[in-house]
Amino acid sequence: MRSLLVITVLVLTIAGVAGAADPDWKLVEQALGKPGQLQAGDVFRVGMPRTDLAVTVKGVPVKAGFALGSYAAFKQIGDQAMVMGDLVLLDQEVPAVMSGLFAGGLEVTAVHNHLNEMAPHVMYMHYAGRGDAVQLAAALRQALSASATPFGPARAPVTAGPALDGKLIEQALGRTGREVGGGVFQVTVPRAETITEMGQPLLPAMGVTTVLNFQPTADGKAAITGDFVLLDKEVNAVARTLRQHGIDVTAIHNHGLMDTPRLFYMHFWATDDAVKLAQGLRAALDQTNSQR
């Protein structure tokens, strides 16, 4: 009888701990001041696009959903949450935001460019942290107070202008995509192998996935950008293939510090016919161990 009582207490205790470990994502939204969405793998992702910036690349206006998308991705693991993401910052915002992240107990895992010839010039700061989800969100919001990152209600959507034929892009890539706003068409391609950090899976919704973005241009063509997630042995094969198809490689670097296997991220840029560009990206994807 005593054994049964002990087992019952243990079961109830474990159940209570498990229930307490589930974050209230509404409180995370309140702490950040932006709404989020629960995605595959129970990843809660909050977008913080830099809609306040008017950025061009080689004279092409860059929409926020195309290449200016700050975000935070939360994943509850046991009694702690992990958060990782990417912040789009003007050069002059970088030092104070970095200090704010450190003050809030977060770590900076990378600071670099994604594209070249940007006006005004922006940098991308990748970060990570572990702890209580609401406290992490509050620390991130405090750090971003040193920038002009917009919070509160989203701005009214801007008329998209010319549109791309997503079906033709999908056919050329052999993958499905979706419009993410402002006429931007996005295709994401996860890696085929399992990616981990300190034994925990790093899921596609956390940003560990190849992203291919298409934005219509005024001349009826498309601009492309995004990043390939690569193993070391794939880097040069992908870069060579992109250049063979007239696509610029604009950056090669890490985003994290302790990913297994070690990952490299390759950013790119080009403007041309959307299907032609998609064919070039497909040839590069074929050099990787990506999901089909």
Image: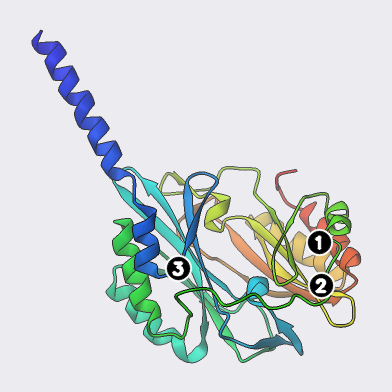
* Residue holding disc 3: 34
Alpha-carbon distance for marks 1 and 3? Answer: 33 Å
Q: Quadrant of residue 59?
A: bottom right
The residue indicated by pointer 1 is 281
230 left or right of 91 in image: right
Among the two numbered marks 1 and 3 on one chain, the one whose residue lies closer to the N terminus = 3
Q: Is residue 129 visible?
A: no
Amino acid bearing label 3: Lys
Residue that lies at the very extreme toward the top in this rendered image: 1
Pick whichever, 122 or 286, lies toward us. Answer: 122
Percent of width and height locating residue 175: 78, 50
Name the disc covering residue 43, or none. Answer: none
Left or right side of 188 for 112: left
The answer to which of marks 2 and 3 sits earlier in the sequence is 3
Spatial separation of the CA atoms under disc 2 and disc 3? 35 Å
Look at the numbered discs 2 and 3 and tell me whether their residues touch, using CB distance below 8 Å: no
The furthest residue to the front: 156
Q: Which mark is residue 247?
A: 2
User: What is the distance, in whole Å, between disc 1 and disc 2 at their CAs?
Assistant: 9 Å
The secondary structure type at the circle numbered 1 is: helix
- The amino acid sitting under disc 1 is Leu
Position of 280 compared to 4: left or right? Answer: right
